[in-house]
Image (cartoon, rainbow, N blue to C red):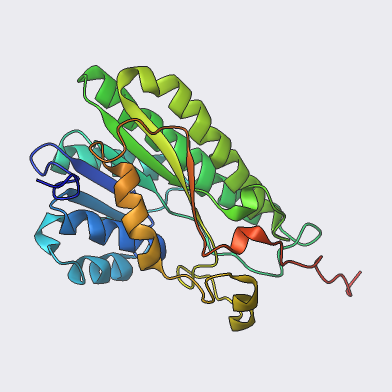
Amino acid sequence: MSVFDRPFDPKQDTALVTGAGNGIGRAIAQALVAEGVRTVFADLSEDKVEAAIAGSIRPELAVPWVGDLAVREGCDALLARARSTLGTVSHFVHSAAPPRRETDHALAVSDDTWEYMRAVNVDAGFHLAREIARSLIAERKPGSFLLLTSLHAATPRNLPHYSTSKAALAMLVKELAKTLGRFGIRVNALVPGAIAAGGFVADPSLTRHIPLGRLGRSEDLAPMALAVLSNRLSAYVTGSAFVVDGGLSLTNWFDPPALDEF
């Protein structure tokens, strides 16, 4: 049997995916259920969650959850939902992120927007990962976590709230990987490039900076996500960042923000 035949064990593996209503999170959640993994589809929008599940190959394996991860009560409610329906969560994907507006540069972003971005990206990611890890440790089970960061964890994006939160997530991956590895829990980062989904509207002219000649799609991320999440395919991989960007990171294409109003 090929190593690629059964990357997951449907009898043992379960998953929780945030941001599963659209974009990359949806693609990963749908790919997991297609592999037979019972998966919680978590998102802020009920309509998007329902559509994502309905569009899955095996919707009977999907569990919907709708709520706001910017507040701790939302995170705890999601954990309770996952435990009551799946038992112990073995695979965690944190893809949720608030919308980004190009006008929210360093001199314009509001305190509320700054706080909300950090709360969803960093605070929720940390709290969910830590609580899922605690359950796995208590039950002596292995696990695999995947946090979505960004090329802009290391390159300015003219959106400081977004870039700094993704930079924090990139370090959180390393911190968690170092601490949790002794318990058989692997933690890695998936680093998307210009993916035309999830609220990001890319200028088609951006393709001139991409060696592979096109914008990315959510579906481009799912195979790599599954490979890294799989304890069979990536058993000796942790604390790593996997870039899926068509080569875009070979160049920095952003100019400084316009400040005409100042």
Task: Locate the C terminus and report the quarter of the image it occupies.
Answer: bottom right
Is 94 positioned to the left or the right of 112 in the image?
Answer: left
x then y, percent, for residue 261: 88, 73
Residue 23 falls in image quadrant: bottom left
Which residue corresponds to the image point at 71% horizontal and 62% vertical from the top-left?
Answer: 252
Coordinates of residue 59 in the picture (x, y in percent):
14, 63
Say which residue appears at 52% left-offset and 71% top-offset: 212
Asked if residue 234 shows in the view, the reply is yes
Task: Left or right? Give the position of 237 relative to 114.
Answer: left
Which quadrant of the figure has residue 35? bottom left
User: The N terminus appears in which quarter of the rendering?
Assistant: top left
Does residue 204 appear left or right of residue 185 in this picture?
A: right
Is 79 above or below relative to 102? above
Residue at 36 percent across and 38 percent down: it is 145
Q: Nearer the viewer, residue 25 or 237?
A: 237
Residue 22 appears anywhere in the view: no
| Place of residue 99 in the rendered image (x, y in percent of width and height, measured from the top left) | 54, 64
Farthest front residue in view: 2
State whether residue 94 is above or below residue 171. below
